[in-house]
Amino acid sequence: MGNQHAEIDLIYLWVDGNDPKWQAKKRAFTGVVSDNSETNNKGRYVNNDELRYALRSAEIHAPWIRKIFVITDDQQPEWLNTQHPRIQVVDHKDIMPPEALPCFNSTVIEYFLYRIPGLSDRFLFANDDMFFNADVTPDFFFEKDGYPIVRLKRKLFGRWHPRLTAFFKGLVGKKLGQYAQKLADSARAVEKKFGTYYSGVPHHNIDAFLTSDYRSAVEEVFADRVRTSQFHHVRTFGDIHRSAFGYYALAIGHGHLKYVDRREASRILVYKHDFMAYLERYAPKLFCLNDNQRVTDDDRKKIRPFLETLFPLRSSFEK
């Protein structure tokens, strides 16, 4: 198992929420393009050109990555060099079951990453707002035995008594927010099956997985939850989150738990933080530039200039 030189691929999800054709499809299917909710806010879909800079960061700081897959919904970035031998655009319909389409729910799209044709046995997964900020080697993501490092933050979820589940389903779900609710549900799902409760919160940055274990998690261990959630075309309370797949790897001894702080993996909030000051203070190896329902269009105007300052040189992945 422990081949340090095994190939490692990188997967990004990407959507251009500014595209009128995509907006028409989403409006026709869901009745709205976006709103100000956590579930369906503009930040989920708007294109701030982050992928261009994410790829620049990968080429600079992780040149050993074998291939980069960009998962899209009948779109592709106009600047992307799709003829590059290390780039492949993968459409939703190529990996997702027909009944799940069209899908505007990244949680559901993530279930089917392992179906990418030609995907290596080890892969990294990132959203397009996640960046490498320093040189890293494969052992930053995988130990010598070949198993992935599962990075969590030391922020603990409370454990709820089973009898209170029905009561808390609506009340606590809203109190926690949908994302936090999904993480808590995922931790409980793993505890139910394996007896271990992982209370740390995922670091919300680039994660590592084994394709074989990811497949087992989706097709076997959490198959019932996946079958239910795959019909949720937009984010829905109750969807099992891929964090469960990381907890699962830990539970079966196929992962290495590592608690991290902001100096290793930082989440920069677009509406709140001074981007450069944050990076200079913590100098993280990885960072996420997180857009959400609190972010305004004026906030978003800061994103591209900041990324251009950090990663000014065109990558070979650009036309």
Image: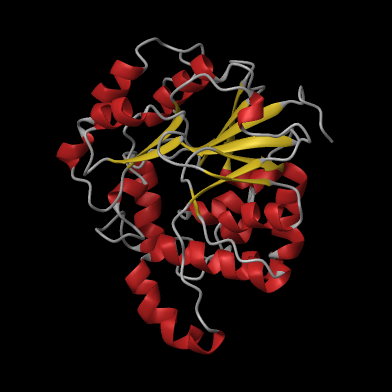
Note whether residue 78 is visible. no
**Drawn side of residue 16 relative to residue 274, left or right:** right
**Drawn side of residue 110 relative to residue 277, left or right:** right
Q: Give whichever of 308, 198 is nearer the camera.
A: 198
Furthest residue in direction left, as rendered:
298
- The answer to which image quadrant residue 120 occupies is top right
Q: Position of residue 122 (x, y in %)?
A: 71, 35
Give the vertical position of 1 relative to 245 (above or below).
above
Q: Position of residue 84 (x, y in %)?
A: 59, 15
Give the vertical position of 316 relative to 7 (above or below).
above
Give the vertical position of 124 relative to 80 (above or below).
below
Q: How many marks?
A: 0
Q: Give whichever of 215, 273 is nearer the camera.
A: 273
Q: Residue at x 39, y 80 (%)?
A: 170
Furthest residue in direction bottom, as rendered:
163
Q: Position of residue 182 (x, y in %)?
A: 49, 64
Q: Position of residue 5 (x, y in %)?
A: 76, 22
Note whether residue 121 is visible. yes
- The answer to which image quadrant residue 216 occupies is bottom right
**Drawn side of residue 108 relative to residue 210, left or right:** left
In the picture, the quarter occupied by the N terminus is top right
Q: Give whichever of 198, 249 is nearer the camera.
A: 198
Q: Residue at x 57, y 65 (%)?
A: 187
Give the vertical position of 214 relative to 31 (above or below).
above
Q: Give whichever of 162, 313 is nearer the camera.
A: 162
- The answer to which image quadrant residue 82 occupies is top right
Q: Residue at x 66, y 66 (%)?
A: 196
